[in-house]
Image: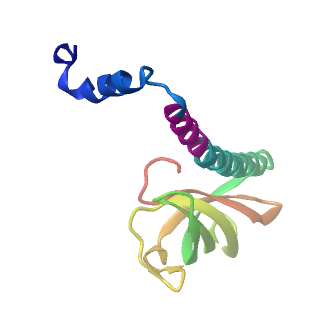
Amino acid sequence: MTSRIPNGLYWIQSEIDQSGDFMNTNNWLAVACFIGFALLVLIPFWFIFSIGSKKVSEEIEKARQERESIRKAGGVTASAVIISAKWEGERNKHLRKILFVVDVLPENQPPFRATFRDEAYRRSVKVENYEMISELGQRIWVTYDPTNSSRMFLERYEDESNSI
C-alpha cells in the first residue's frame, strides 16, 4: 500500500496506518494550539495596526481641511526662504514632518517671518541636532491666510515643478 504513495506523503500514510485516523486527539490538540497561538499574535497586531492607520488617516484629513480652509479664506501663495527646518519625525521613509521658520516674500507686500509645521517628501537630508541643514536657504512656495499669517502650509519646493 505504501509503494503507491509519493515519497513526500509517506509519513502521513504511516500516521494513518499506526493510529487508524490521522486526526486523532493529539493532532487536533496541536492544530488547536497552532490556531490559538496565531490568533493571539494576529489579533493584537491587527488591532494596533488599525488604530495607527486610523490615526494617520485622521491626521491627513485634518491637514487637508486646514489647507482648504486657508484657500477659502483667500489664501495667498508666495515665495519664501527657509531660515530653519527642524525635523520632527517622519510618516514613512521620505515623508518628513518639519517645523519651518521662513522669510515670506509676498508680491507688493512687505516680507515677514513665519513659523509653521508641515510634511514634505525629502529623500536625502543632512540633519544635525534635529536641524535639517540641507534645507537652509532653500526657496519654497507657501500659501498663507492673509488675515492670519500664522496659518500657512507648504505648496512646493522651488526646484519641484508640481505640488507636494
Q: Position of residue 113 (x, y in %)?
A: 68, 76
Q: Between 153 and 124, which is closer to the camera in this rendering?
A: 124
Query: Residue at the location (49% across, 68% down)?
Result: 139
Query: Residue at the location (18% across, 26% down)?
Result: 7
Residues in magenta? 26-38
Q: Position of residue 8 (x, y in %)?
A: 23, 28
* Labels in figure, total: 0
Q: Between 128 and 142, which is closer to the camera in this rendering?
A: 128
Q: Is residue 152 left or right of residue 83?
A: right
Q: Is residue 57 left or right of residue 157?
A: right
Please, is residue 131 above or below residue 23 in the view?
below
User: Which quarter of the image is occupied by the N terminus?
Assistant: top left
Q: Position of residue 82 (x, y in %)?
A: 55, 74
Q: Is residue 97 left or right of residue 109?
A: left
- Magenta span: predominant SS is helix
Please, is residue 10 above or below residue 120 in the view?
above
Q: Between 101 and 109, which is closer to the camera in this rendering?
A: 101
Does residue 78 appear in the picture of this structure? no
Query: Residue at the location (50% across, 27% down)?
Result: 24
Q: Residue furthest left?
A: 3
Q: Is residue 106 magenta?
A: no
Query: Residue at the location (54% across, 81% down)?
Result: 130
The colour scheme used to paint the residues is rainbow
Does residue 164 appear in the picture of this structure? yes
Q: Is residue 33 magenta?
A: yes
